Amino acid sequence: MRKLKNIFPHYINSLLNSYSQIFFSKNSVFAVLLIIVTFFDIYAGISGIIAVTVTNTIAYLVGFNRFNIRSGYYGFNSLLVGLGLGVYYEPNLQFFMLLFFAALLTLFLTIVLEGVIGKYGLPFLSISFLISLWLITLASREFKALTISERGIYTFNEMYLLGGIGLLHIYEWFNNLNLPEYIVLYFRSLGAIFFQYHLFAGLLVALGLLIYSRIAFLLSVFGFGSAYLFYQIIGGNISELSYGYIGFNFILSAIAIGGFFIVSSKYSFLWVLLLVPLISILISGTTAIFSIFQLSIYSLPFNIIVITFLYVLKFRERFFLKPEIVGLQHFSPEVNLYTQKNNQGRFKDSYIIPISLPFWGEWKVTQAHNGKITHKGDWRHAWDFEIVDETQKYFSGSGLTCSDYYCYSKPIIAPAAGYIEQIQDFVDDNKIGDVNTEKNWGNTIIIRHTDLLFTKISHIKKESFKLNVGDYVKKGDVIASCGNSGRSPQPHLHFQLQATPFIGSKTLDYPLGHYILHNGNDFELKSYNRPQEDDIISNIERNLSLYKAYHFIPGQNISFDIFDENDKRIKSYSWEVQVDIYNQSLIYCETTGSKAYFYNDGEFHYFTSFEGNKKSLLYYFYLANYKVMTAFYKNLKINDYYPLNNTGNNFILILQDFVAPFYIFMKSKFQLNYVSKKDDFINSDIILQSKAEIKIGKFITKEISFEIQIIDNVINTLTILQGSRKVIAKRIFNE
């Protein structure tokens, strides 16, 4: 086994995934059950394993993508070809020679289809299986050394030889259950996917499907049930479903469209229902054509419907969530659903360019949208800002000169990266109380962020500009100073967003990215929001210790020792920061093989998903640090929600899975509190507290509390409290 691992790494994974990929899965338990099903015909089972092994080995030796090999993408079509040939022909030397070349042909066709169909962002499904099996079936009619199998004719004898009298009794018991026609056809159709037509085979597949995904199982029943009902209503020939049990086309199509390529929802279920008649038409039509050549259509209708539907959806101009295409594939309808719903809540504004405030420090909104004085009509979506002291005064001294005002001559900074589009710099500052209505906007700068998004800052101090038209500016760069030019009775900043690059353009109702709302000693994080009049606000001011602590760099190694509440060491964990083939950053636990994916935009650290052992330290680290702003504001609270698949109670989550496409009754809440900070000029010792809470309605079913201690710019200690159990993870620093 060690030698095999050296020659062909991940052989076992590639073998198992080749079986489970037929149902769009990477579940190893499901794969083992499917392997057992294929061995109901022992020669078919052997042929299937040989075909997969040949395909995956050649793919590896030729140098094809190892991730695709390991995932079973290249193997599952060859598996189906091997099963089909293994059932149809008697085994002999010539047969196994043909099987080898059939696997090779299927691999080549798979690679070609991956290139041709894949460039449109579409799956190749089981097309290479169809082409290979049809070609080999036609060609083998001229191969005299091949013998057509008579297995399946004397079923009782075969069952006896395979498992003795016990297996024969089980087989007879299932056949004598007198189940309704729909249920019999459903189970036999499931088994027929692997060329096994026994009721027991279909039952095992259904069990594996239920273990792998409750949504997939529900869709299989719904898809087949809809087809059966359609045939009853339309007066169709129900024998089409029993002939070769090609009703599995409805099952596979329902799973693919209802929950795998499409996020499972009431809309995906509706489309499954609407596509059932089209699959029926294709089954009848293609059967009539292929019967001329004495060929079965196998999974042809499934391939045509799924690929066509996914391609058609690419031409939508609106209603992109009805139904919603899966963005990042997790090979589970539940995980696809929970992750995408969670991301819609967390990152719903990610398409918006985050616009910051154009200043440093705390300023007051003296006029907001739909202002009392000037923000009216087409120019109503704008803000005016000034600085006030503790007594809400705007100036010191008499307030009769511009220099008395706190905001006068203060730096103006770029609210986002872009190019300087226009500068107006010839208007003198007004005396306090005067206004210049002729040059209404005063000295102004316009920055282009995209072709349809510009920011405009007005009433700037004359000759204070640091840049020229055409210059590129980074977010936070100083661009000018606050003044009192134009229609401005006292120093202030006018700030607006607009879709055109002209002074005087209409304003856009566009939110600011992230900012802090100040209320005395209380702070509130506002994201993609619009400041209101009299708000005291500021940009997020980075804390260097927090920034460094959550700035995980690829290649970085992190180690922790785990201690119980009596300070007894329990276990050690070693992690490595990595980047995967999709350019996603992650922390990989070398001890357990778990992965915690994360994203950091400089202002926030986000964990996005978790895979692996939910008893590992990395899992609790993921829960504790789910969303952290890299700035410190005492007692500030940050709230978020976890995807249910990463936190839910297993039993209750199973119930949730069945109804998840229609209703979510569980919530997994995250809360972070900024507790204390001790500065020593360069570093800050910081304590954060967070909490993971699972709720059903108003009832809390699970709660875990954490304390995170940051010392010398690293996460030094993580304390975990769950019920009466307390454990402490302490960072290990290698000398």
Image (cartoon, helix red, strand yellow):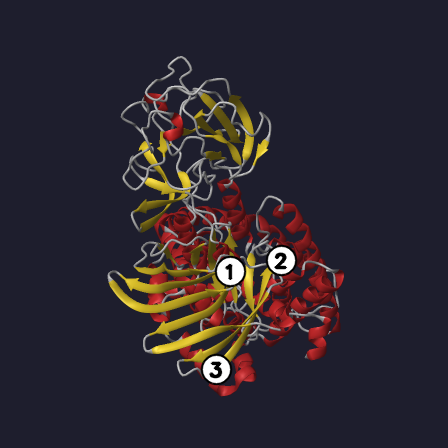
Q: Residue furthest bottom?
A: 165
**Mark 3 in CB contact with mark 1 (< 8 angstroms):** no
The front one of 221 and 701 is 701
Q: Which residue is mark 3?
A: 570
Can you say which quadrant of the picture contains the N terminus?
A: bottom right
Mark with earlier residue (2, 3): 2
Label 2, label 1: how far apart the Cα atoms are: 51 Å
Residue in the picture at 60% in, 76% down: 42
Residue in the picture at 49% in, 52% down: 261
Q: Is residue 404 above or below residue 610?
A: above
Q: Which residue is mark 1?
A: 549
The front one of 328 and 619 is 619
Q: Disc 3 residue type?
A: Ile
Residue 198 appears anywhere in the view: no
For label 3, the crowd category at 10 Å Cα-Cα, with few meaning under 14, some 14 to 19 and many 20 or more, is: few
Dot 3: what SS? strand
The front one of 688 and 130 is 688
Mark with earlier residue (3, 1): 1
Q: Is residue 440 above or below residue 79?
A: above
Q: Position of residue 153 (x, y in %)?
A: 55, 73
Dot 1: what SS? helix
Q: Residue furthest top?
A: 438
Circle nearer the viewer, 2 or 1:
1
**Mark 2 in CB contact with mark 1 (< 8 angstroms):** no
Dot 2: what SS? helix
Mark with earlier residue (2, 1): 2
Which quadrant of the view contains residue 65? bottom right
**Mark 2 in CB contact with mark 3 (< 8 angstroms):** no
Q: Disc 1 residue type?
A: Ala
Q: Which residue is mark 2?
A: 129
